[in-house]
Image: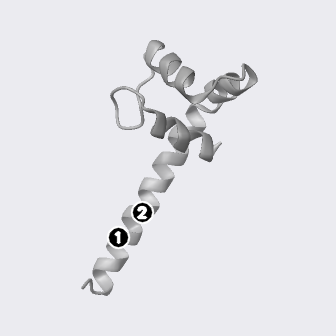
Amino acid sequence: MLGAAGRRNLEAHRVVRTRDADAFADRLRGVFEGFELRCLSQRPMVAKLNGMGIGAPRGGEWKSKQVQRMLARQ
């Protein structure tokens, strides 16, 4: 079991991760708005992001689940 200090540490970590994810989504908001205006589905979005050389949130190539999460944040 986690003590009070462990729970506070986990909550602080969650807050930082959420803040970082929101900031990343904000930087790519225009890209995703353009995709939606062009009525692209998720697979073409993945292909476009990878083709444009835009790294995924943790680096590397985009996967469908990452695009789903970004769309949920938009």
Q: Residues within 10 Å of mark 1 (few under 14, many from 20)?
A: few
Query: What kind of residue is marked 1?
Result: Leu
Indicate the secondary structure of the residue bearing disc 2: helix
Asked if disc 2 and disc 1 are in contact, CB closer than 8 Å, the reply is: yes
Which residue is painted at 49% across and 18% down in the image?
47
**Front residue of this view, candidates 20 and 39:** 39
Counting from the top left corner in percent of width and height, residue 63 is at: 42, 32
Counting from the top left corner in percent of width and height, residue 72 is at: 61, 46
- Above or below, 12 against 49 in this view is below
Which residue is painted at 42% across and 37% down in the image?
57
Query: What kind of residue is marked 2?
Result: Arg
Counting from the top left corner in percent of width and height, residue 22 is at: 54, 47
- In which quadrant will I find the C terminus? top right
Which residue is painted at 69% across and 28% down in the image?
33
Q: Looking at this rendering, what residue extends furthest in the right direction?
A: 37
Quadrant of the rendered image containing residue 35? top right
Residue denoted by label 2: 14
Spatial CA distance of label 2 from label 1 is 6 Å
Residue denoted by label 1: 10
Which residue is painted at 52% across and 17% down in the image?
48
